[in-house]
Image: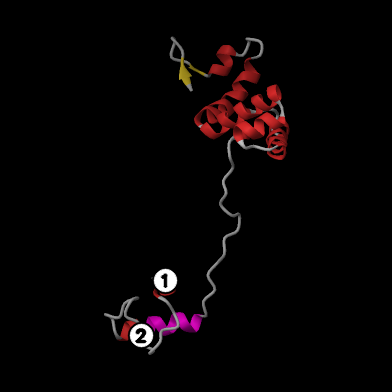
């Protein structure tokens, strides 16, 4: 919210709402800001323009980007209404991460052992001659 000269609350939409095409431009601004911050998206747009002008073989030689990837980028642009932010790379973090499966008896055993011998740490697991549980596994299980 902004205030005008009389101190009344106003928004830019009400101020510029009568200008033709303002609504479309105002809806496109966040997409453009996101696109301008991403160098990868700008490079992808440059590669698409090069492909349109010179073709597939030249694009493959110049950038190492084949026709399949070009079509993937074009499809993302088409599905998102030609918004430049469609070329911004998506996160590669898995949607579902693996959960560590540890037998509760092992966790209870380690906790009881550490309560009994409080100086016993993850590196000094002396409860067996050959430890079957590594220190990298004990740390996330017990803390």
| Label 2 crowd (10 A; few <14 / some 14-19 / many >=20) | some
Res 113 label: 2
In the depicted structure, whether residue 19 falls above or below residue 36: above
**For the residues carrying marks 1 and 2, which lies nearer the camera in this image?**
1
Residue that appears at 60% across and 58% down: 96
Q: Secondary structure at mark 1?
A: helix
Q: Main secondary structure of the magenta part?
A: helix
The location of residue 126, given as percent across then percent down, is 34, 86
Mark pair 1, 2: CA separation: 17 Å
Residue 71 left/right relative to 18 = right
Dot 1, crowdedness within 10 Å: few (<14), some or many (≥20)?
A: few
| Residue ID at (48%, 23%) | 1
Which of the two discs, 1 and 2, labels the residue nearer the N terminus? Answer: 2
Which residue is depicted at the point 50% across and 30% down?
Answer: 37
Viewport quadrant of the C terminus: bottom left
Q: How is the image coloured?
A: secondary structure
Q: In this orientation, which residue lies closer to the viewer: 96 or 15?
A: 96
State the mark number for residue 136. Answer: 1
Percent from the top left, x then y, of residue 25? 62, 19
| Foreground of the two, 25 or 87 | 87
Question: Mark 1 and 2 residues: CB-CB less than 8 Å, in contact?
Answer: no
Image x and y of residue 20, in percent: 66, 10
Against 28, residue 142 (above or below) is below
From which residue to which does the magenta span run? 104-112
117 vs 108, left or right, is left
Residue at 59% over, 42% down: 90
Inspect the magenta stretch and tell me whether residue 62 lies in it. no
């Amino acid at each position: 919210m902004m205030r005008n000269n009389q101190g009344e609350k106003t928004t830019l939409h009400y101020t510029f709402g009568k200008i033709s095409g303002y609504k479309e431009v105002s809806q496109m601004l966040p997409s453009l800001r996101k696109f301008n911050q991403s160098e990868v998206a700008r490079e992808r747009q440059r590669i698409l323009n090069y492909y349109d002008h010179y073709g597939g073989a030249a694009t493959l030689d110049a950038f190492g980007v084949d026709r399949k990837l070009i079509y993937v980028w074009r499809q993302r642009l088409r599905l998102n209404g030609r918004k430049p932010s469609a070329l911004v790379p998506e996160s590669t973090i898995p949607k579902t991460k693996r959960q560590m499966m540890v037998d509760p008896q092992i966790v209870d055993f380690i906790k009881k052992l550490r309560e009994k011998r409080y100086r016993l740490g993850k590196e000094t697991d002396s409860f067996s001659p050959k430890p079957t549980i590594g220190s990298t596994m004990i740390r996330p299980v017990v803390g």
